[in-house]
Amino acid sequence: MSLVGMPLISWNLCGRSEWGNDYETSKTAENASIIGNVTNDYPPIYISDGNTVSFYNQAIAFDKELTAMGHFHVFNFYGRDKPS
């Protein structure tokens, strides 16, 4: 059995039923966002985001918030201009 394309299929069938088509700015996305929960006690973190079915805007905002607060983190990002 091949799993090629499975994450996208799963997202299209299951994810969109809960999150809708506007998954980056929907009320569900707002409720799930961790950006507003960054405190001075936040641990070091590794962030990775892809370029297909991703949370592009939230990953960028999270990186900026951690940087602004001086938290150690590594941000691995694959831009939308890169092939998926």
Image (spheres, rainbow, N blue to C red):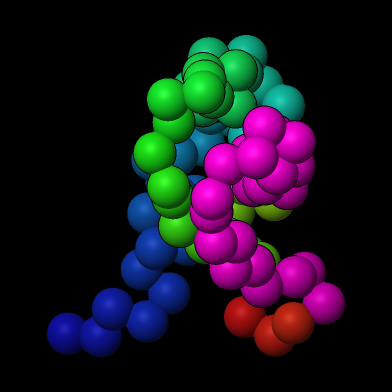
In this picture, residue 11 sits left or right of residue 27? left
Frontmost residue, 35 versus 66: 66
Residue at the location (25% across, 85% down)? 2
In this picture, residue 21 sits left or right of residue 13? right
Q: Is residue 29 shown to the viewer in this render? A: no
What residue occupies the far right of the structure in this picture? 81
* Residue 61 colored in magenta in the image: yes
Residue at the location (28% across, 78% down)? 3
Residue at the location (44% across, 31% down)? 42
What residue occupies the far left of the structure in this picture? 1
Task: Count the numbered circles shown.
Answer: 0
Percent position of residue 28, x then y:
54, 18
Q: Is residue 81 shown to the viewer in this render? A: yes
Percent position of residue 81, x then y:
82, 77
Q: In the picture, residue 82 is in which quadrant?
A: bottom right
Q: Is residue 69 above or below residue 75?
A: above
Frontmost residue, 17 versus 45: 45
Q: In the picture, residue 68 is in which quadrant?
A: top right
* Residue 67 colored in magenta in the image: yes
Residue at the location (72% across, 27% down)? 25
| Quadrant location, the N terminus | bottom left
In this picture, residue 40 sits left or right of residue 6? right
Frontmost residue, 80 versus 22: 80
Q: Is residue 18 above or below residue 36?
A: below
| Quadrant location, the C terminus | bottom right
In this picture, residue 21 sits left or right of residue 8? right
Percent position of residue 15, x then y:
45, 39
Magenta stretch bounds: 57-81
